[in-house]
Image: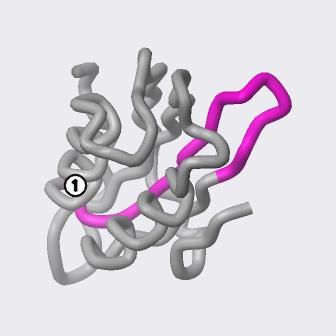
Amino acid sequence: MSEVPQKQAASGPTVVRFTARVVGRVQGVGFRDYVRTRGRRLGLAGTATNMPDGAVVVIAEGAEPACRNLVRLLVTGHTPGWTERVELVWQRAQGDLVDFRRK
C-alpha cells in the first residue's frame, strides 16, 4: 500500500483518510450496508456511495489502524458480492465526515 499522509490527533492515535473505488459485483448485494456497519464498528466516519458505472466509492476517516482494517476487508473481498479490484488513495484527514453513511 502507498504511504499514508498522517494527522496526529490532539490526544490519541494518528488520524487518516482514504478513498477507495471498489469494482466488481458490489451493487445490489448489501455491500454498502456491510461497509457502513464495519466502518461504524471500527469507529470510522465515512460514506459508501453507488456510482453509475457499477462501482462503489468508499470514503473513510479515523484512526489509522481502523482505516487499514477496513481497507483490508475491501481488498480481500470479505464482503457481500465480490471485489474485482480496489483503487485506493490515502489522504490527509479533513475532519468533515460525521458517522458512517451509505448514499
Can you identify the residue that label 1 sits on?
Answer: 64
Residue in the image at 65% along x and 29% along y? 55
On screen, residue 55 above or below 93: above
Magenta stretch: helix, strand or loop mostly: strand
Left or right: residue 9 compared with residue 93: left
Image quarter hosting the N terminus: top left
The x, y position of residue 59, in whole percent, is 54, 50
Q: Is residue 51 magenta?
A: yes
Left or right: residue 100 compared with residue 61: right
Label 1 is placed on what type of residue? Glu
Q: Residues within 10 Å of mark 1 (few under 14, many from 20)?
A: many
The x, y position of residue 78, in whole percent, is 25, 42
Quadrant in the rendering for residue 53? top right
Camera-nearest residue between 28 and 89: 28
The residues colored magenta run 49-64
Left or right: residue 36 compared with residue 75: right
Image quarter hosting the C terminus: bottom right
